[in-house]
Image: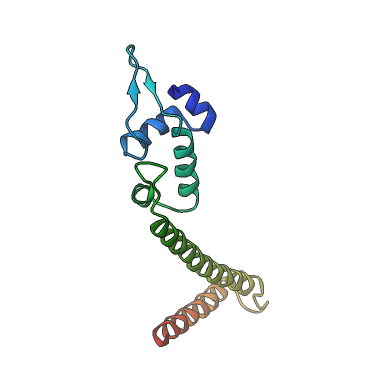
Amino acid sequence: MRIGELARRTGLAASRIRFYESEGLISAVKRTANGYREYAADAELLLTIITRAQSSGFTLEEIRQLLPADLDVWEYDQLLAALKRKVSEIEALQSRLEQNRKQLLGTIASIENKPEEVGCADNARRVLNNLHGKQIKSLADAEVQ
């Protein structure tokens, strides 16, 4: 199939398909006599795998290492290990994001709950001192672990 049809089927821009080809993620294509690219039938499946892997957080290098030259010959153990590693990375990221979220919500609450007798500049110092104290405690907790 030609690049235009492949682009329509996958929802990818033709330039993105050419990029994946230049990166070696999809095999080199045949060219017709008039120079048009002709992609193999499995190119659509490969592009779907690549885009889903990217949206799951895999880098192009990780994808390149996992994609077999022939879709019939997958390294299942290697693939399974990579998928499990990615899940662990995502879980660690979620944990860090949740910590960041809690810190931001605490900062917002600290700013919103400014004592009336405290001016803005003094409140800013109060909030920053609270943040600094929490950061030092967080670093100390991390060293203990």
From what the image shows, is residue 83 above or below residue 35?
below
- Rendering coords of residue 2 (x, y %): 44, 21
* In the displayed structure image, the side of residue 119 where residue 69 appears, left or right: left
- Residue 117 figure quarter: bottom right
From what the image shows, is residue 115 above or below residue 6?
below
Residue at 34%, 42% in the rendered image: 69
- Rendering coords of residue 111 (x, y %): 61, 71
- Rendering coords of residue 115 (x, y %): 66, 78
Quadrant that contains the N terminus = top left
Residue at 50%, 80% in the rendered image: 134
In this view of the protein, which residue sits in the foreground, 53 or 92? 53
Residue at 34%, 51% in the rendered image: 65
Among all residues in the image, which is located at the extreme top? Answer: 34
* In the displayed structure image, the side of residue 12 where residue 117 appears, left or right: right
From what the image shows, is residue 89 above or below residue 142?
above
- Rendering coords of residue 98 (x, y %): 56, 69
In this view of the protein, which residue sits in the foreground, 35 or 68? 68
In this view of the protein, which residue sits in the foreground, 107 or 24? 24
From what the image shows, is residue 120 above or below residue 79?
below
Quadrant that contains the C terminus = bottom left
